[in-house]
Amino acid sequence: MRFLPDSYYSTLAAAHSESPFLSPVKSSHYVNDVAMWLQAAGGDTVLAEVGPGYGEIAVRISMLLERHSIFWAIDICPEFLAHVARRWDGHPSQLRTLTLDITQTPPQEVCLLRRRVDRLVAINVVQDTDLLTTLTLFSRWLRPGGYLWVTILAKETMDLYYSQHPLYDKTQGWYYKPATAGVQLGKRSTGRGDIGYDRILRFYTQGEAQDALALSNYVIMRQRNIAFPASIMSSRWKEMGTREFFRDGIVEALECAGTYVDSYEFVAQCIIA
């Protein structure tokens, strides 16, 4: 099931502006770390990124890619892939782009990359999909022994600082928004009457993320929190404008803990024989 309409991504890509949501790829150090991890796979390898956005990681890996390696950029939105192609700084033959809705992947697209990918990156992607289904798809693309680098939005943070907010469902881990566009999925009581809503983000606990990785045939090699300090978060408040839903929780998190834990990062090895 896809939670966000295609038009959302196309609008964001066309605007080429900052997303209201946090992302570690806004840090050049983080982007370099991911690119170096991809490059460490060595020569004559197949690398992939699902949801490359404006191409932050792609443009960095294009400068590092071994001569006979290939990089796949996979996205539901062709406009984002166009950004990647324009920014690509390596040999054109090393870049492959694939427009694909990973929640509705036809068999031929699974076969196209089946057991071909050595390392795959998905930063801030899986919250728009069913986690277990998506991780399983990635395991079908990876070679046995291949590696996945993935971030998963942290439900514990939402439960701590947003549990009473009418747009957050603590039981299921959904963040809703009032339905103003796209498909209205239903109505939800807010205590102030019913509102139409769209489901747009799904948060998972660390345990749920670990279980999903295990069920989809991964062994976790490394995990850590993606936490943003006050020095970064304070500059985000103005950008958020009237988005009190996120802003107020961030302020409380910084006051209580000094950092805002946005997501969990996992590096895991695919163990399918």
Image (cartoon, rainbow, N blue to C red):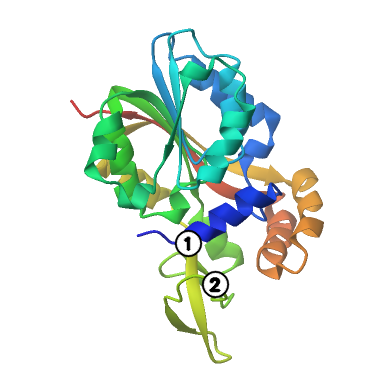
Give the x, y percent position of residue 213.
Answer: 33, 41
Give the x, y percent position of residue 131.
Answer: 36, 51
Categorize mark 1 by other alpha carbons within 10 Å: few (<14), some (14-19), many (20+).
some
Horizontally, is 240 left or right of 162 in the view? Answer: right
Residue beneath label 1, please? 5
Which quadrant: the N terminus?
Answer: bottom left
> Callout 2, which amino acid?
Ala
Q: Is residue 238 above or below residue 196?
A: above
Residue projecting furthest to the bottom? 193
Q: Secondary structure at mark 1?
A: loop
Give the x, y percent position of residue 24.
Answer: 62, 39
Residue beneath label 2, please? 181
Q: Is residue 253 above or below residue 132?
A: below
Can you tell which mark lies on residue 18?
none
Q: Residue at x 75, y 69 (%)?
A: 242
Query: Looking at this view, is 243 or 204 the one in front?
Result: 243
Residue 41: quarter of image:
top left
Q: CB atoms at circles 1 and 2 under 8 Å apart?
A: yes
Counting residues from the start of the chain, the first of labels 1 and 2 encountered is 1
